Image (spheres, grey):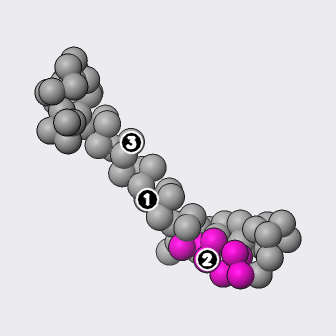
């Protein structure tokens, strides 16, 4: 519960900082942007640790090895 309150406080402080620099409209969107940004960063970090450290898989060596390449 304490960590959630601390995170909410951080969101509020960040939003106030955005409001001072960019305006109130951007400050209203800032908490959602911050949450998405940090969730994606954390998820990507955990996925990278799983992929490279736990499963010991390396980077794809050729572009054709990547399923989304052309």
Seen in the picture, residue 31 relative to 25 is either above or below; the reply is above
The residue located at (61%, 77%) in the rendering is: 29
- SS assignment at label 3: helix
Q: Residue furthest front?
A: 70
Choose top left, top right, bottom left or bottom right for residue 32. bottom right
Residue indicated by mark 1: 39
Total marks shown come to: 3
Left or right: 16, with 66 as reference point: right
Q: Percent x, y for residue 27?
A: 71, 76
- Which region of the structure is painted magenta? 25-32
As drawn, is 46 to the left or to the right of 10? left
Q: Residue beneath label 2, please? A: 29
Whether residue 33 can be seen here: yes
Q: Position of residue 44 (x, y in %)?
A: 36, 46
Q: CA distance from mark 3 to mark 1?
A: 10 Å
Horizontal placement of 25 versus 50: left or right?
right
Q: Going from the N terminus, do you reach mark 3 or mark 1 first?
A: 1
Which label lies toward us, 2 or 3?
2
Cα distance between the residues tagged 2 and 3: 25 Å
Q: Residues within 10 Å of mark 2 (few under 14, many from 20)?
A: few
Residue at the top extreme of this rendering = 61
Task: Say whether disc 2 or disc 1 marks the residue closer to the N-terminus.
Answer: 2
Q: Quadrant of residue 53?
A: top left
Residue drawn at (19%, 36%) of the image: 70
Image coordinates for residue 66, horizontal then vertical, percent: 18, 33
């Amino acid at each position: 519960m304490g960590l959630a309150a601390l995170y909410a406080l951080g969101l509020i402080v960040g939003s106030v900082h955005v409001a001072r620099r960019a305006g109130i409209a951007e400050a209203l969107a800032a908490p959602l942007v911050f949450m998405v940004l940090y969730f994606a960063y954390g998820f990507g970090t955990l996925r990278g640790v799983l992929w490279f450290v736990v499963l010991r898989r390396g980077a794809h060596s050729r572009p054709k090895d990547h399923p989304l390449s052309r």
